């Protein structure tokens, strides 16, 4: 058996013994030339500094059809993130259309939200964008785009209780029909929610895909830090999809 194969088997065994696997993915459908933008459905730069302190959050849809009862869209959603001590917490929320619903607890991150099984109307998904934002109409910190049923953000904050988050795979690409170009960057943002480092970058286009796999090594993130994809030097109206995999060790 080759050394490469032995290394791969050792890596798989190590991953299987790890605390948990993480997959994060998302898209930005309208990146422009003016400035860098993160890969999340809201567009623009992610407001990391919002979570320098724990925040009260709220949720609402832009459609009245996303609510419990006879509406056609999403009736109930689950939210996964981190509490004021960076411990993983979850909340189940009954939607009320365009009316704000308070989310229990305080939060230092929203890592994912999705529609609960069996809680939709005839459309089978959310009719409008469902926005999770800081209480009292503050900054949007996560979004479930219309018809997607789950948040779309290639952004993740590492919880406490683990030594580190280790990335095993990175991928980013454009639609095959576009003729645009951009630079994609995989970055870390420190636990201060400000300090940023570029860990890997490459040009991408409709014919050049960013793809990295790490059988040994890979970028590592400490508790409280963020992993995130962003795009720079993009042409106007560029659409980029990105995702990363990793393990909490």
Image (cartoon, rainbow, N blue to C red):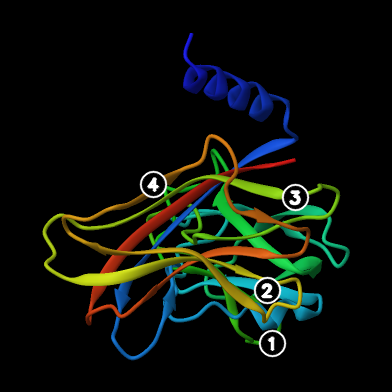
The residue that disc 1 covers is 136
Q: Which mark is residue 164?
A: 3
Q: Secondary structure at mark 1?
A: loop
Is tag 3's residue or tag 2's residue first in the polypeptide sequence? Answer: 2
Q: Residue at x 49, y 18 (%)?
A: 5
Is tag 3's residue or tag 1's residue first in the polypeptide sequence? Answer: 1
Q: Nearer the viewer, residue 112 or 167?
A: 167
x, y percentage for residue 206?
17, 59
* Alpha carbon separation for disc pair 3 and 2: 30 Å
Is tag 3's residue or tag 4's residue first in the polypeptide sequence? Answer: 4
Q: Which mark is residue 61?
A: none
- Extreme-top residue of the structure: 1
* Alpha carbon separation for disc pair 4 and 2: 25 Å
Instruction: Kindly indicate the quadrant of the structure image that contains residue 49.
Output: bottom right
Q: Secondary structure at mark 2?
A: strand
Q: Secondary structure at mark 4?
A: loop
Query: How many residues crowd around disc 1 within 10 Å: few (fewer than 14), some, or many (20 or more)?
Result: few
The residue that disc 4 covers is 122
Query: How many residues crowd around disc 4 within 10 Å: few (fewer than 14), some, or many (20 or more)?
Result: few
Against 30, residue 227 (above or below) is above
The answer to whether the residue labelled 3 contacts the one labelled 1, judged by CB atoms less than 8 Å apart, is: no
Is tag 4's residue or tag 2's residue first in the polypeptide sequence? Answer: 2
Q: Nearer the viewer, mark 1 or mark 4?
A: 1
The residue that disc 2 covers is 58
Instruction: Kindly indicate the quadrant of the structure image that contains residue 138.
Output: bottom right
Q: Residue at x 21, y 70 (%)?
A: 181
* Alpha carbon separation for disc pair 1 and 2: 8 Å
């Amino acid at each position: 058996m080759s050394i490469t194969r032995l290394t791969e088997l050792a890596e798989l065994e190590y991953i299987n013994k790890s605390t948990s696997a993480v997959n994060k993915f998302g898209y930005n459908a309208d990146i422009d030339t003016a400035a860098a933008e993160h890969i999340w459905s809201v567009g623009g730069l992610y407001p990391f500094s919002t979570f320098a302190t724990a925040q009260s959050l709220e949720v609402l849809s832009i459609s009245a059809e996303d609510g419990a009862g006879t509406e056609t869209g999403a009736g109930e959603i689950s939210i996964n993130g981190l509490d004021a001590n960076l411990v993983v917490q979850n909340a189940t929320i009954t939607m009320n259309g365009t009316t704000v619903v308070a989310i229990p607890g305080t939060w230092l991150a929203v890592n994912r939200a999705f529609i609960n099984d069996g809680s939709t109307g005839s459309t089978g998904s959310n009719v409008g964008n469902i926005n999770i934002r800081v209480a009292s109409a503050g900054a949007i910190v996560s979004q479930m785009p219309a018809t997607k049923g789950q948040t779309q953000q290639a952004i993740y904050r590492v919880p406490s209780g683990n030594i580190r988050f280790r990335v095993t795979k990175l991928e980013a690409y454009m639609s095959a029909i576009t003729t645009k170009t951009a630079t994609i960057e995989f970055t870390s943002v420190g636990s201060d929610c400000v300090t940023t480092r570029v860990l890997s970058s490459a040009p991408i286009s409709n014919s050049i895909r960013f793809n990295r796999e790490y059988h040994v090594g890979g970028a590592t993130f400490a508790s409280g830090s963020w992993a995130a994809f962003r795009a720079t030097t993009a042409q106007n109206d560029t659409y980029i999809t990105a995702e990363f995999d990793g393990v909490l060790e």
